[in-house]
Image: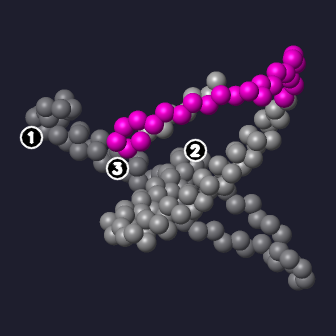
Amino acid sequence: MDHLHTPQSGLPESEAAAEARRLIDDWAARPVRHHPTSFRDDTELPPIGTTPPVKQEDHRIVPAWAAGIAVASIGVGAGITGIGCGAWLILQGLASVTLYGVLAVTLPFAGIAAVATAIGGAISKARSETPKHIYEGPVYQHNETHTTSNQRGMFARTRNTVR
């Protein structure tokens, strides 16, 4: 069977097996790279005082911009949830409307409107000019006034005419 060729390699089966064995042995001879999952500091500690700082490598999985977006989206979600709860409470309150409830809600607005109207009126009155009555020209006084009264009709309408 040594003269048979495999369709993929074009090598006889014995040569293909020898090449496979060589590749496997070459791979097995390479050192295995271990990735530590923890760190132990074996440096000597000073007998008195605090321990000096040890540099710790920064191995972040998530980029800073992605973490910022995640925190912002959590904040927006919490805010929207708060608004939704507030709207739910308001709508629950509106579902059970009573006269006292309507008065309790509208009374502060009515008070504010009354105060605003009073302030506006005071400002308007303070800004308006005092009337100046200055009469120029001759003054005529007629001592002879003539009044005519007519009474007519069933209910006695009175019409006075002053001349």
Residue displayed at 23% across by 40% down: 16
Residue displayed at 20% across by 42% down: 14
Q: Secondary structure at mark 1?
A: loop
Magenta includes 43?
A: no
Name the spot of residue 1 as percent of width and height, x first: 9, 40
Q: Which residue is mark 1?
A: 1
Q: Secondary structure at mark 2?
A: helix
Label 1 vs 3, first from the N-terminus = 1
Q: Residues within 10 Å of mark 2 (few under 14, many from 20)?
A: few
- What separation in Å lies between label 2 and label 3 (alpha carbons)? 44 Å
Q: Amino acid at mark 3?
A: Ile
Residue displayed at 64% across by 24% down: 163
Q: Amino acid at mark 2?
A: Trp
Mark 1–mark 3 CB contact (< 8 Å): no
Q: Which region shows up in magenta?
A: 133-156
Magenta includes 144?
A: yes
Q: Nearest to the eye among marks 1 and 2: give it.
A: 2
Q: Amino acid at mark 1?
A: Met
Q: Which residue is mark 3?
A: 24
Q: Which of the two residues, 53 or 24, is positioned nearer the viewer here?
A: 53
Residue displayed at 82% across by 78% down: 45
Q: Which residue is mark 2?
A: 65
- What separation in Å lies between label 1 and label 3 (alpha carbons)? 23 Å
Q: Main secondary structure of the magenta part?
A: loop
Q: Which mark is residue 116?
A: none
Name the spot of residue 13 as percent of width and height, x first: 17, 40
Q: Is residue 50 above or below residue 9?
A: below
**Is there any visible trace of residue 137 in the rendered image?**
yes
